[in-house]
Image (tube, coloured by chain):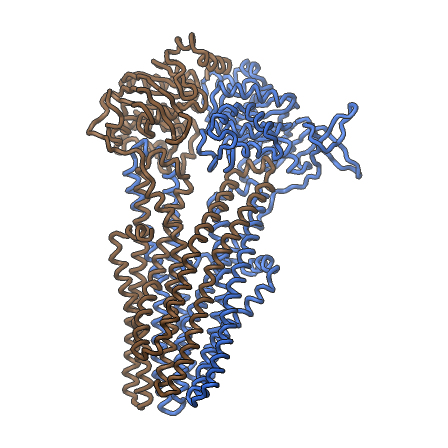
Amino acid sequence: MLRRIFSYMHQYKIYAVLAVFCVAAESIFELIVPVIMADLIDVGVAGQDRQYIYAKGIQMGVCAILALILGVGSARFSALAGQGLGAELRKAEYERLQAYSFSNIDHFRVSSIVTRLTSDVTNIQNSVSTGLRPFCRGPVMLVSATVVAFTMNARLALVFLVALPTLAVLLFLIVKNVRPLYSKMQNAIDLVNRIIQENLTAIRVVKAYVRGDYETAKFEEVNLNLKSQSEKAFRLAALNMPAMQIVMYGTILGLIWFGGRMIQNGEMQVGELTGFLSYVMQILNSLMMISNVFLMMTRSMASGSRILEIIDEKIDITDQDAKDLEVKKGSIEFDHVSFKYKKDAEEEVLTDITLNIPAGSTFGIVGQTGSAKTTLVQLIPRLYDVTKGEIRIDGIPVKNYPLEHLRDAIAVVLQKNTLFSGSMIDNLRWGKEDASMEEIREACRISCADEFIDRLSDGYDTEMGQGGVNVSGGQKQRLCIARAILKEPKVLILDDSTSAVDTATEAKIREMLASRLPDMTKIIIAQRISSVRHADQILILDDGKIADIGTHEELLRRSPIYQEIYESQKEGAQL
Amino acid sequence: MARYIGYKRPKDIGRTLRYLIRYLGGHKWMFLFVAVLVLISTGANIMGTYLLKPVINRFILPGDVTGLLKAVTGMGLLYFVGAFATFGYNQLMVKTAQKVIKEIRQDLFAHVQKLPLKYFDAHTHGELMSRFTNDVDTVQEAMNNSFAMLIQSFLMLTGTITMMLVLSVRLTLIVVVFLLLMAAFIKFNGSHSRKYFQRQQEEIGKINGFVEEMAAGQKVEKVFNHEKVDFERFCEMNEALRKESTNALTFAGMMVPTIVSLSYVNYAVSACVGGLFTLSGMLDIGSLASYLVYVRQSAMPMNQFTQQVNFLLAALSGAERIFDMMDEEPEIDEGDITLCNVENRDGKWVECEQKTGNYAWREVKDGRAVLTLLKGDVRFHDVEFSYVRGKKILNGISLYAKPGQKIAFVGSTGAGKTTIVNLVNRFYEIDAGTITYDGIDIRRIRKDDLRRSMAMVIQDTHLFTGTIAENIRYGKPDATEEDIREAARVANADSFIRRLPQGYDTMIYGDGSNLSQGQRQLLAIARAAVVKPPVLVLDEATSSIDTRTERLIEKGMDAIMEGRTVFVIAHRLSTVRNSKAIMVLEKGEVIERGDHDELLQQKGRYYQLYTGQFELE
């Protein structure tokens, strides 16, 4: 997984290499400086040579400056590499998200997508930026100090051959065992966060039903779980330190004993022993650094796998059968279409739907809550793919159109619609990027949005605020319709898009659509009979099946469901 | 290592510390013990280095093998104790930290449950969440590592400086100068990188906002083929963030190498000067050698000490934000009138234990319980209310709902419909006037009991992760399977639930995103129906439900709410048509009141709405 994450470094790889070089070069000074120092004392001071002392002092000063340059360089390069990796990861995730189909989108919650794009990436990039230095220093110090130790006294250096593997095994065991504990801890954190999140969003429900105590008890449970999981993980990770100390102290004692014996037998000098001891520290310290980086990486790997989940999500709607085609007229045929959201789901959401919508006609859909009206229309622009059967536009299967053209030709005004922050005109231009002011005004006239926009002091430049909070429900719906019309689609689908618009305005929108855009196929899902009664055909969906299709008059005559809906609304105004 | 210096400093360290001590107080012996263990561990480390010289001089050079063996054994013992102490304080610290953190998290959560809705309106979820995540995390990290490391590095630093002072006071002055230089640099670097981190934070904020909006509107983006344009904007922000964070991390990353280089210079200067001292006979060569070892050692703890101080400050400011939240005033609840079950014994209502479906308000007067039968008579007398001081939402509203009546509110967004029902159960406190419930001022009723006496279905259905049955049971913890089914039938949810693969045991994830909006509303209604409350509030509860289903629900609800008070808020006039009294609200005032036919005759605003001449905005 590490390798996959790092493969996203792309053009920033060069900086990673430079950073590694700088760190490695810099750590050499850690070894050179003590050697210069030894010379200064052994030759300069012992030989009473002032010039030599100054020379060595200057040498050390030069080393310090070089080390500083390399150090600053390593900081810059590792920041470039780490943050570059982060930027590339975010880009890769975002790019992938854009290719998602509706069912892919349904897999992830909005909040989870946001954390995967932000804090998870931050975790990775920061552990690279800060981990790179100790991670490179470690091996360089390890190798060079070992080499120096062996050249100094190979026999005494044998002590390392016991100490090094022991520590390596200990640290490896810790890192290996702590990894699953960390991921368990991460799950516990997710659980705690989920409970808090749900509680915060539903705080009114909690208060209305006086369930604060229940919620607190529920939280206590997950909180306790998190406590024990993180205690386990951190306690194991905390063994790092004593393990390192035991091995280090053991090595020191070994060196003193064997080294002392060698000195006593005249096989070694005192200076050599003290030199040895300082290398021991360096070697073991470097191992410690490596294991610390591993521990840190292990934690950020949890983030890594969450990022890869976004990137690895299998996209189920693609352009693979597309030919170079465009929608010409906009007639729609459903040919024995069935649909399930998940392949392994038992129940079909739509069953055996066959219908024919001629180009330029108006098609109404009514039905109970949960009768799959929305699902039905979302199959047309391939927001979801059919499970069985086929949908054809102008006689050609939808799979044969490139997705971009298909969705350009079919405008959907979603039930749960969104406006974005920015001005009203920015939002309208979503439909057509280079739309002229005249085109925009025309679209707003058709959707009857011009009435209220003209009344606003800033007109079309009114700022929307996130989610379009500055306009009422009915106004928002009219804007969304205008946005869709601007696309100049062949097919316009209105999914319960006029529910908050008053009936008089709704009737006006209907007339405008019919007179100004006669060639456009219009599909209207509605709760209100008044919204669809003028349609050329009305489909009644019942539990994912066609209950009846006909004109208003026909259905009123023969369909009991339609009669019932009609009755339920007749008394309550023509809503 | 991946921690950064928070750019916000704690404002009132004293108060935060007092709070912290309250949490740590229970573990004060533990902390003392940890401090002692750190002392032992660090002492063993320093002692070991110190002992090297005498061991060499007394045993190794004279060739004393048994002495050497004894010395090595002694040192081994010392080291063993040291390592054991390290093990001990690490484990203890983790254990204590987790315990304290758990307590803080728990208290914070419990406190949040008591905060008034006003607080939630004024803060975003992200903000509140970050108290639980980021702030608690920094405190935890600081306790896991910084506390012990701070003591340790302080001991190492003072120990090393003492040793140097013993060896040569004058030479130590050089080191002190360099240590001060290092400290100054650390401070300089800290304040500069804070600036960069702040800029990085701003960029992160921008990109977060963008991603949040796009993730929420992803389906619209698809429908409009708008991916390319958004991707370009995203790339711009992404690049800006990359630049800022690279700068921030470069600055932060420069700290350690600069300190190391400074320590080389320090080393060089000390060596030269020390060498000259030795030449002039002020110092012997052995002392110079061991002195220089200490010089080398002094940079690390210095570095560590300042870093830990920064981490601690960051943790303290995190803790401060946590405790600020805990200091927020909880909801006022001065009421002492409680709700109790009553049964009819020989024509008289008497208090009883078991649930009878009848309730009474119980007030203690002169040591005697006085019962008032709960009927659901709600009255507003000249009620004024504002969410923000000076911006009046309700302007002297008076209204009454007689027991058993169905009262409907109609009006534009912002007219105050939802506000009125939110005042009845005291989600918010009124500015002036009174609200009475069965003749009792609602402020005298204990809040929990007040809310228990009514069920609310709000427009945004909030479901919890759990099974469908659990979600319906939310309204009434002791509801039986049969109660749940019954409520689901009333809400017309039974048929769709039974068609789900696991029926009532089907799991709902993340606010019920696997259900349609209409289905979620049906569940929310079932959740209220299971309570069979004396008063029911339906705030746009059926907005996403088709009219036919709505009528079926209405019938079911009418049956269980027979003789009880129902408040209905709706956009759709078909929803409110059958209400006893319909109130048309505009700008915080009741402009029309009457039943459907009366209002139509008045030919006022209701008539306009009804005939489709007016749109609710």
Q: Which residue is more in the foreground, A247 or A382?
A: A247
Q: Which residue is more in the foreground, B461 or B103?
A: B103
Estimate the x, y position of residue B562 in percent, counting from the top left.
63, 21
Q: Which residue is more in the foreground, B428 or A67?
A: A67
B551 shown above or below A417 = above
Estimate the x, y position of residue B263 in percent, counting from the top left.
37, 74
Please indicate, yes or no, whether residue B309 appears anywhere in the rendered image.
Answer: yes
Quadrant of res B569: top right
A401 shown above or below A118 = above
B49 shown above or below A375 = below
Q: Residue furthest bottom?
A: B281
Residue at (79% x, 36% y) in the render: B368
Estimate the x, y position of residue A30 in percent, counting from the top left.
33, 73
Estimate the x, y position of residue A220 in percent, counting from the top left.
57, 47
What color was chain A assigned in the picture?
A: brown
Quadrant of res A337: top left
Q: Residue furthest left?
A: A324
Please indicate, yes or no, whether residue B173 appears anywhere in the rendered image.
Answer: no
Direction from residue B439 to residue B223 in the image, left or right: left
Direction from residue B502 to residue B475 in the image, left or right: right
Q: How many marks?
A: 0
Direction from residue B127 to residue A88 in the image, left or right: left
What color was chain B assigned in the picture?
A: blue
Quadrant of res A244: bottom left
